[in-house]
């Protein structure tokens, strides 16, 4: 039985020896995580929509010149040169916010993994989602958006239902789901760190609130 995470292909790939991330692979891997928001429920549709919008913006930029933008860093450097990196709908902003959402979802999954391994197996995942939000996205959000995420955390599915959905609707596969989940986020975090380093190196880790 293949879990949700085992079926993800392509997954995020580590950067090359020069720290470059292949844009096409990154975008394809990014699209693979989107369905997890469907599993989390309708309250997560704003998050899903935001992720899809950011991937679409980056894809549009990449497709405008695939040779030039073969690596993600080239997109950032291009917008720096054109002095539009901080524009609201720039590809730089899209990458920045997508990276932050990946930090949010991977931290939530890590908390879930740790809870499972401890044997606690807390059914109410709301506190996990709130903690992940507080430690990643909250500082970039104004009061109104914070309220939206407060609603999201209260609408989280029960743990057993979430894990069952990730097992394709089958029972008694929690350990397999958790194992595949752990392997998946391990790979994602390598990419997150690389993207973060790129943004920081180019002074593009904007701290503006939305």
Image (tube, rainbow, N blue to C red):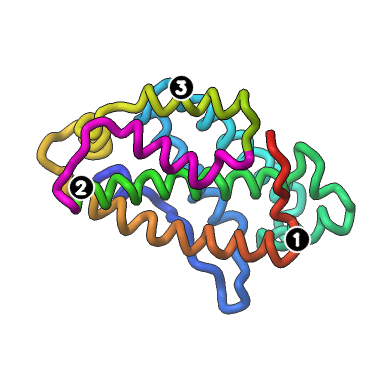
Q: Which residues are magenta?
A: 118-140
From the image, which quarter does the C terminus lie in? top right
Q: How packed is label 1: few (under 14 Cα within 10 Å), some, or many (20 or more)?
A: few
Residue under numbered circle 1: 203
Element assignment for label 2: helix
- Location of residue 169 (image quadrant): top left
Earlier sequence position, callout 2 versus callout 1: 2
Cα distance, mark 2 to mark 1?
38 Å
Disc sitting over residue 151 in the figure: 3
Residue placed most toward the observer, 71 or 199: 199
Earlier sequence position, callout 3 versus callout 1: 3
Residue placed most toward the observer, 189 or 3: 189
* Left or right: 123 in relation to 185: left
Residue 68 can be seen in this image: no
Residue 152 can be seen in this image: yes
Q: Going 70% across and 47% down the picture, which residue do you hit?
A: 207
Q: Give percent across and percent down for residue 10.
A: 44, 54
Main secondary structure of the magenta stretch: helix
Earlier sequence position, callout 3 versus callout 2: 2
The answer to whether the residue labelled 3 contacts the one labelled 2, judged by CB atoms less than 8 Å apart, is: no
Residue under numbered circle 2: 116
Q: Give percent across and percent down for residue 49.
A: 56, 29
């Amino acid at each position: 039985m293949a879990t949700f995470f085992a079926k993800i292909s392509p997954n995020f790939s580590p950067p090359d020896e020069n720290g470059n991330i292949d844009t096409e692979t990154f975008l394809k891997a990014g699209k693979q995580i989107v369905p997890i928001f469907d599993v989390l429920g309708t309250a997560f549709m704003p998050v899903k929509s935001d992720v899809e919008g950011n991937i679409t913006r980056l894809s549009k930029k990449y497709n405008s010149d695939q040779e030039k933008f073969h690596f993600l860093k080239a997109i950032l450097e291009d917008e720096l040169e054109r002095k539009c990196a901080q524009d609201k709908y720039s590809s730089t902003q899209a990458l920045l916010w997508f990276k932050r959402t990946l930090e949010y979802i991977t931290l939530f999954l890590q908390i879930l993994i740790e809870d499972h391994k401890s044997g606690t197996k807390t059914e109410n995942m709301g506190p996990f989602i709130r903690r992940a939000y507080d430690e990643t996205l909250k500082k970039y959000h104004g009061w109104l958006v914070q309220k939206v995420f407060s609603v999201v955390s209260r609408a989280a599915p029960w743990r057993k239902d979430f894990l069952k959905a990730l097992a394709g609707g089958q029972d008694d596969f929690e350990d397999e789901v958790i194992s595949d989940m752990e392997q998946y986020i391990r790979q994602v975090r390598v990419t997150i760190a690389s993207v973060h380093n790129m943004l920081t190196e180019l002074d593009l880790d904007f701290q503006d609130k939305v």
